[in-house]
Structure formats: structure tokens, C-alpha cells
Amino acid sequence: MKQQITFYLPESCFPAPIWEKSWKEKAPFPAEAIIPPIFSAQNWIYQTWLLLNEAGVECELTSQMPQQGIVIALNSSLEVFEEWHRPIPPNVFFVDIVTQRFVHPAAHFHLVQNKKRAHFLPDSLFVPHWPQPHLLARDPDRGDRFENAYFVGQTYQCHREIFSLEWIQEVRRRAGIYLEMPPVEFWHDYRHADVSIALRNAAALHHFNKPATKLYNAWHAGIPFIGGKESGYLSEGTVEKNYLQANSASELLAQLIRLKEDVALRKKLVEQGSAAAKRVSTEAILKYWKFLVSEKLPTLAEIFSQHSPRERHLFLMRKKMIRLANRYFAI
């Protein structure tokens, strides 16, 4: 028997009232309606459901937990709405998309956004993060100019030294580069960017819960990327081939100067990044999602449905232990 695929998203996580209105009225909702800023709940749930529907894949979106079938939900939205304290219906095969350090203790399967994390989390599978919707690539008319470095993200995530006044002035003086942190509504706009930088405060951590989104977007935007020693970047890219690495403010400055002086290196990184971007394009990721909802998850759900009550109980006990242990391996 074919199992219904349902994406669960609380109404409070909808991006805007017009989205909620269209959904309730069963009105057509084109992908072009996804506009920045777009955050985890909309990106992983609403956008995935929307693109699958437009591709002709049968799946539903709901704001209420179904009583049966395969249910896909974002773990962070479940915690916010206290769904953790409610039992998962016995006829539901529950799949949580892990975007935080924690995993849902009752999930039968996990989708993770970092390939390295899948090594530490049983019953999980890596799914690449979607590219930034409506991404505007670098303006080709900029040619070989190298003046603007973008950090696209939240202020608290950025290495504290990078946007200090002293460091900004030093970069401007020594490399002739302006550092910019565009507001969230312009995270999709790389038209005036010449390089993307991503160095977090905790640069020494592997950040197993973080995706390689900034790397993907730089590839799609046609600009070089300089990132920290994060597991997501290391597993998805190749240092010195399609991106550069820096683990401190001083190393970042050295890499910026290096790119400023070496046009050939910039072009190589862009060309190699463009080639790598094909495997994390919207079309490629949509194809992977089709496989997930049409083959992988239904097969897993069928296997689980054949488990005895005792086997299911032992499974949930094991998942609770994994949840506790995983908190120490997701940094």
C-alpha cells in the first residue's frame, strides 16, 4: 500500500500571511513566490513541498500532525511548538530534518544537512541544502575588479575580529578591499560581490550541524570563497581547488591579498566552483528529493511497519540514548 508523504509545518512558521492564505485556499503557489529572506522552516519544508508538487510528486503540507503515513518535519519547529512532549502517532513513520544540535528522540529517521554528521548519527542520511532562492550572480561587467568581500549571515556568527574597525581599516589599507555584511533581505544578491568569506567565532570547531550553504552560494554566484575549517566545507569542497581556507583573521587577510594579486587563481576557483555547483543545483537536489520520497523513505517505512511492539519499544529507547550522545558530537 502506498504511504502518504506529508510535510509538517506549523502555521506560525509560514513566511508571510499571503502564503498561509494561498495554502488554505489550495491556490497555485509558484516557486517565484519564494522571496528573501527565507529561513530554515520555509527552506526545508515549504520550499521542498512546493518544488516537489510543481514537479508532479504527490505530497501534502499540513499544520497538524497526521495520524498515519510518512511525516517529514523540521526538528527546530517541533521544539518551538512543544511537539516533543506529545507521542508520535503509532501509524506514522516520522522523519526529522536536523538543523540544530539536537535530534528528535522519537524520529524513525533523520535527514541531516552536513555529510560528516551522518557518520555520527545512526539512521540518518545527508541531504544537500537548497541554494539561496532567486540568487543573483556576480555582475560580469565587474570583470577583474576585486574590491568587495561579502559576509552573508548573522552578525553573531561572524568571527569577532573580522568586523572590528581596526581590522576593516587594515584590510582596506593593505588589500584595497571593502568588507560588507549585507542585510538579510539582500542575502541573495551577489551582483557587486567579488569574494565571499565565512569565518565563525568558534573557528576551531567542526560545526557538524552546519551546512555548506555559503560555499554552494558562492559557487552559484561565480565568486571565490574563503571559509573556515568546517566539516561542511571540507566534505563538499576541495581546498585550493574550488575554495580557499582561513582559520583566523590574519590568515583571512593573507588569502584576500593573495586573491587580490592573483587573477588566475580567482578565475580557477570560479571555474572549478561552477563545475562543483552542478551537483548542488536546485535541479540536482530536487532529483534527490524525488528519490527520497518515492523510494528511500517508503522502503524504510515498510520495514519499520513489520517490527513487533517490543522491537519498536527497543528502537525508541535506543533513539533516546542517541539523542543524548549526539549533543556531544554535533559541534
Image: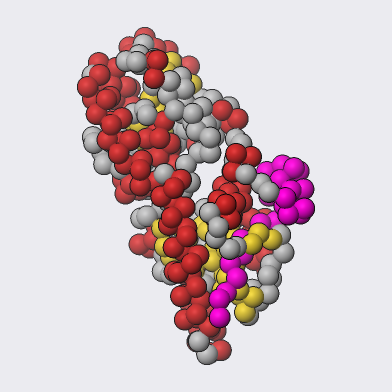
The residue at 67%/64% (across/down) is 83
Image quadrant where one finds the N terminus = bottom right
In this view, 26 is above or below 218:
below
Determine the residue located farthest toward the front in the rendered image. 56
The residues colored magenta run 1-27
Q: Is residue 38 visible?
A: yes
- Observer-nearest of 32 and 64: 32
Q: Is residue 196 left or right of residue 156?
A: left
Is residue 317 something that shows in the picture? no
The colour scheme of the drawn protein is secondary structure
Q: Position of residue 237 (x, y in %)?
A: 30, 43
Q: Relative to the observer, which residue lies in front, 23 or 46? A: 23
**157 or 197: nearer the viewer:** 197
Q: Which residue sits at x=27%, y=35%?
A: 272
Picture layout, residue 65 above or below residue 316: above
- Residue 2: image quadrant is bottom right
Q: Residue at x 32, y 22 (%)?
A: 256
Q: Quadrant of residue 105?
A: bottom right
Horizontally, residue 185 falls left or right of residue 168, namely: right
